[in-house]
Image (cartoon, rainbow, N blue to C red):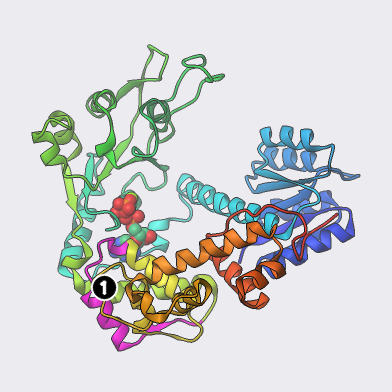
């Protein structure tokens, strides 16, 4: 459970924020004095800080700079009153994650908190790699029961000791990143950082500066020089995710680093040398792309000095059940609850399914089934409601029948296969109604013809699944006011 430190000298405000957070299943502790809170935050007691801006002894901005001076990266959200927003904006530049202007509503608080915690989680994962302490590959063991994944594991062991480039191929969701991390963790570079760049996520110009860094004034907006990932990963490993998406120019630049270990920052003519092991992944048929002239042949051969192919899940069905059980156990540990089991029929459904989204799809399915389960078992109906295709007919899930009721349609108007679609329709309907009613839960529930409690439960689930949307309006039930 995420631990949140709430600091405000106003008792009423402090208590209402704590209550909202506790009701949303966070662990919240209130502090009146930031100097007292500071020690506990530095002691590593919290995942997130929500603090008032104006306080007598140490104010929010002071706290923030003390934390950062001490090298503490814990995310900070500032609460500001009207008139101090400008200060909050300044604080953002000092590294505050976000600010909330008082009076704000419970839902607003929840959304900002959730976003900050997600961000904090990513940051921690990155730091863990930097310090080499917590090692994801070790804490997240790979399931490899069938012979084909056993062979992949043997390849990981074989390529780990040296520094040659590895190309990991496989359909989306097969575990390419996991294999890349396992290679780094088993390599002599394990104590050094492993950084990742997704080549599909950025425009070519941004990607170039992300990979190689830039000098001050290299382009509009480059107000200071910046190290790229190659420099930051020096001595460690760089994961180039979706390397097939690089354009011609970046392919050439990458080839040069791989061959000569040398590159220039954008806007600089000084060649820099680095010692970085590159692991690239792709779900594209790069070999064919080379023949079609879409990818440089010399780069392809450079990248695939040591190729590792991960077969799709449908070609290693013996891994499906162990993976499902492993994932359910992990969810149970994370949520601190009893482990869910699959009924034999549910298991058969999983075994007969084709898994177009591979392990990631199985993971999402187990998350959804767990989030919605109200007892200890997952049955076939629940599984079928979420499978994308070729699942046998099953009873509609609760969400489907609920959406039917909401939309005033009959049972047969729906195809049970479309459970996921229906759940999404229901979610949109709920948020449309919330917006229409200015975020007022009671009015929304009435408009939808459902109970207030049902609505509350649904919103709670959306929050757990990261599916909340911001809702405007002021007079929300349970609003946090000053
Ligand atoms: N063998 C495995 N054992 C346990 N978990 C696995 C295994 N393979 C994949 N996973 C889990 O499945 C999810 C998807 O894996 P990963 O992100 O490595 O796939 P990917 O091939 O990089 O996907 P994409 O192509 O979408 O980027 C991750 O959460 C990962 O932890
Ligand atoms: Mg990936």
Q: Is residue 344 magenta?
A: yes
| Residue 470 location (% of width, % of height) | 62, 53
Residue 435 visible within the image? yes
Nearest the camera: 264 or 371? 371
Figure quadrant of residue 343: bottom left
Q: Is residue 423 above or below residue 138?
A: below
| Residue 42 location (% of width, % of height) | 70, 50
Q: Specify the quadrant that holds the N terminus.
A: bottom right
Indicate left or right for 381 with 22 as reference. Answer: left
| Residue 281 location (% of width, % of height) | 26, 45
Q: Give the magenta-colored segment's residue range.
A: 338-359
Q: Is residue 423 above or below residue 232?
A: below
Indicate left or right for 237 with 217 as reference. Answer: left
Name, please, the residue furthest toward the right.
56
Residue drawn at (34%, 39%), measured in percent from left and top? Answer: 200
Residue drawn at (16%, 61%), measured in percent from left and top? Answer: 151
Indicate left or right for 261 with 132 as reference. Answer: left
Residue annotated with mark 1? 320
């Amino acid at each position: 459970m995420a631990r949140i430190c709430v600091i405000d000298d106003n008792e009423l405000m402090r208590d209402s924020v704590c209550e909202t957070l506790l009701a949303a299943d966070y662990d919240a502790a209130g502090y009146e004095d930031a100097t007292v809170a500071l020690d506990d935050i530095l002691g590593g007691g919290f995942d997130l800080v929500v603090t008032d801006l104006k306080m007598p002894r140490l104010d929010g901005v002071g706290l923030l700079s003390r934390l950062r001076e001490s090298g503490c990266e814990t995310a900070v959200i500032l609460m500001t009153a009207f008139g101090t927003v400008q200060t909050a904006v300044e604080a953002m530049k000092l590294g505050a994650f976000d600010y909330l202007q008082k009076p704000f509503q419970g839902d607003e608080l929840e959304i900002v908190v959730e976003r900050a915690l997600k961000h904090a989680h990513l940051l921690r994962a990155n730091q863990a790699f930097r310090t080499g302490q917590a090692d994801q590959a070790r804490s997240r063991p790979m399931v490899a029961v069938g012979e084909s994944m056993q062979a992949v594991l043997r390849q990981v062991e074989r390529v780990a000791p040296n520094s040659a480039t590895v190309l990991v191929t496989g359909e989306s969701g097969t575990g390419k990143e996991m294999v890349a991390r396992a290679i780094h963790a088993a390599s002599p570079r394990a104590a050094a950082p492993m950084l990742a760049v997704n080549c599909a996520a950025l425009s070519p110009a941004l990607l170039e500066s992300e990979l190689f860094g830039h000098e001050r004034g290299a382009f509009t907006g480059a107000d200071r020089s910046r190290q790229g990932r190659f420099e930051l990963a020096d001595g460690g490993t760089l994961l180039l995710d979706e390397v097939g998406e690089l354009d011609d120019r970046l392919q050439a630049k990458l080839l040069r680093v791989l061959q000569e270990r040398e590159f220039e920052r954008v806007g600089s003519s000084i060649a820099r040398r680095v010692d970085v092991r590159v692991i690239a992944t792709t779900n594209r048929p790069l070999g064919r792309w080379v023949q079609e002239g879409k990818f440089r042949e010399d780069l392809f051969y450079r990248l695939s000095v040591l190729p590792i192919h991960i077969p799709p899940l449908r070609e290693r069905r013996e891994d499906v059940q162990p993976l499902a059980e492993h994932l359910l156990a992990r969810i149970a540990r994370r949520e601190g609850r009893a482990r869910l089991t699959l009924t034999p029929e549910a298991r058969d459904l999983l075994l007969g399914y084709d898994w177009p989204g591979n392990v990631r799809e199985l993971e999402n399915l187990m998350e959804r089934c767990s989030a919605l389960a109200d007892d200890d078992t997952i049955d076939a109906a629940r599984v079928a409601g979420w499978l994308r295709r070729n699942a046998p007919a099953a009873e509609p899930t609760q969400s489907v029948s609920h959406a039917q009721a909401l939309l005033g349609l009959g049972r047969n108007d729906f195809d049970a296969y479309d459970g996921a679609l229906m759940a999404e329709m229901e979610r949109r309907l709920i948020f449309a109604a919330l917006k229409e009613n200015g975020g007022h839960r009671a009015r929304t529930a009435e408009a939808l013809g459902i109970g207030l409690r049902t609505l509350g439960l649904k919103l709670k689930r959306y929050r757990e699944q990261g599916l909340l949307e911001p809702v405007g309006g002021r007079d929300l039930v349970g609003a946090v006011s000053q």
